[in-house]
């Protein structure tokens, strides 16, 4: 995929107006509907996945992309994958939440989780919704749960319909844990590793890899994983977070990475937003103010001297590029997805034809067992009496002088 096709996007939602075509919206809705029906358990679906090490700035980046204020204090929204769906519409805004159970859940647990639905009137309710979902999933220290796993693979799906400014679907994954501790065991480390691997190893997943500006790129787990599953870097978008927290004088090193000239090179390159400071988050600054603060930050010294690509600086540029990338990616992959679904339907149909008649009630089961007993009796009776030529001739047939085990009377004599 050519980077230049989707690189240059103007700041703000106005630059995205041309992308809100009916075909684009229909494609995203089709993929979203397939995922909600569990098709992704059998067929890989195109998706964007936000991943990175713990405390790498994923939550702030996701908030910048979606304008959804995810809670950060207790990390409750990073214990399970969260799918965020934005649909730009003139309709009255609606925010809903639901749980998509992991395919390995029991039928009883799946039914219980699928009953979870929440209508969110205000984002201030989001922490409680996340807490309730986590408790229902059985997470430890959620609700009244004193025991249970620290991480689960059920997906919390948050859908926002209204004047969102864009159509986008993103899966937000728990952060990779570097080392085990008293709070996070080795089992937790491995659980998150497997969870992230299960998403990014799929060839139809666009990886949004969040890396901290102040950390050595070679030491960040997500980069090692992207090299493992996306060696050519064809489906990985790098996002450099927290550029305002690096040591003074190291800007040139970070700029080298931002310009895709460091040791870790990606075909889709890197973007560098500046997330709000703790003070700005407390003040709940609006999106326009965030964009203005970012613009000022990167246009003042020392960043002004780094000759950064203006098309790759700021959350607005990242948001626009991701929407274009996702649109192109879905358009490319959707025909293949359709063909795989058709093939699965054909195979499933053949499997169903090979199944015996349905026995839905106890009476049907009794009748079936009675028929088996009668068939057994019709075989054993002539076998014991030595009458091998009246019924079931093929069953009692012999091969030359070999009597065969189906003729017990002959064997006895």
Image (tube, grey):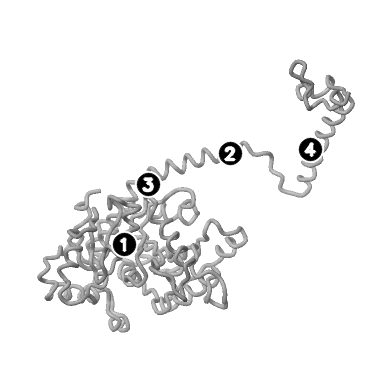
> Which mark, residue 351?
2
> Which mark, residue 209?
1
Between the C-alphas of marks 1 and 4, the distance is 60 Å
Q: Nearer the viewer, mark 1 or mark 4?
A: 1
The mark that comes first in sequence, 1 or 2, is 1
SS category of the residue bearing label 1: strand
Between the C-alphas of marks 1 and 2, the distance is 41 Å
Q: Relative to 318, say whether 344 is above or below.
A: above
The mark that comes first in sequence, 2 or 3, is 3
Residue at image point 87% right, 28% down = 384
Between the C-alphas of marks 2 and 3, the distance is 25 Å
Q: Residues within 10 Å of mark 2 (few under 14, many from 20)?
A: few
Residue 227: in sight, yes or no? yes
Between the C-alphas of marks 4 and 3, the distance is 48 Å
201 or 26: nearer the eye?
Answer: 201
Residue at image point 61% right, 58% down = 107
Q: Quadrant of residue 114?
A: bottom right
Residue 92: in sight, yes or no? no
Q: Position of residue 227 (x, y in %)?
A: 31, 54
Between the C-alphas of marks 2 and 4, the distance is 23 Å
Q: Nearer the viewer, mark 2 or mark 3?
A: 2
> Which mark, residue 372?
4
Q: Kindly indicate whether the residue at mark 4 contacts the one at mark 1 (C-beta within 8 angstroms).
A: no
Q: Residues within 10 Å of mark 1 (few under 14, many from 20)?
A: many
261 left or right, relative to 42: left
SS category of the residue bearing label 3: helix
The mark that comes first in sequence, 1 or 4, is 1
Residue that carries the numbered disc 3 in the rendered image: 334
250 left or right, relative to 150: left
Q: Nearer the viewer, mark 1 or mark 2?
A: 1
């Amino acid at each position: 995929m050519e980077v230049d096709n989707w690189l240059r996007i103007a700041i703000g939602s106005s630059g995205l107006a041309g992308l809100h075509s009916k075909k684009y919206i229909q494609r995203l809705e089709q993929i979203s509907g397939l995922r909600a029906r569990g098709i992704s358990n059998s067929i890989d679906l195109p998706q964007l996945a936000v991943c990175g090490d713990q405390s790498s700035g994923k939550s702030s980046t996701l908030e910048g992309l979606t304008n959804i204020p995810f809670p950060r204090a207790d990390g409750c929204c990073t214990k399970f994958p969260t799918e965020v769906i934005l649909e730009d519409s003139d309709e009255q805004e609606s925010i809903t939440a639901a749980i998509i159970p992991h395919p390995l859940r029991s039928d009883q647990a799946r039914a219980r989780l699928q009953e979870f639905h929440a209508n969110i009137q205000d984002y201030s309710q989001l922490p409680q919704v996340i807490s309730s979902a986590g408790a229902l999933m059985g997470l430890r220290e959620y609700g009244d749960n004193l025991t249970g796993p620290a991480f689960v693979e059920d997906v919390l799906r948050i859908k926002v319909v209204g004047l969102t400014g864009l159509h986008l679907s993103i899966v937000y994954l728990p952060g990779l844990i570097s080392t085990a501790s008293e709070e996070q065991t080795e089992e937790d480390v491995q659980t998150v590793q497997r969870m992230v691997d299960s998403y990014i190893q799929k060839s139809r997943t666009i990886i949004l890899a969040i890396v901290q500006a102040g950390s050595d790129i070679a030491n960040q787990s997500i980069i090692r994983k992207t090299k493992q599953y996306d060696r050519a870097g064809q489906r990985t978008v790098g996002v450099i977070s927290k550029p305002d927290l690096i040591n003074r004088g190291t800007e040139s090193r970070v700029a080298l990475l931002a310009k895709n000239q460091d040791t870790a090179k990606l075909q889709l390159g890197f973007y560098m937003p500046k997330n709000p400071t703790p003070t700005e988050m407390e003040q709940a600054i609006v999106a326009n103010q965030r964009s203005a603060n970012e613009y000022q930050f990167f246009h003042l010294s020392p960043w002004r001297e780094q000759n950064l690509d203006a098309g790759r600086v700021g959350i607005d540029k990242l948001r626009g590029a991701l929407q274009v990338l996702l649109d192109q990616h879905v358009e490319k992959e959707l025909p293949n997805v359709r063909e795989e679904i058709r093939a699965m339907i054909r195979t499933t149909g053949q499997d169903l034809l090979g199944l015996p008649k349905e026995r839905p009630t106890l009476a049907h089961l009794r009748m079936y067992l009675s028929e088996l007993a009668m068939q057994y009796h019709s075989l054993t009776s002539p076998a014991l009496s030595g009458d091998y030529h009246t019924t079931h001739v093929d069953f009692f047939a012999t091969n030359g002088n070999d009597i065969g085990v189906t003729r017990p009377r002959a064997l006895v004599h």
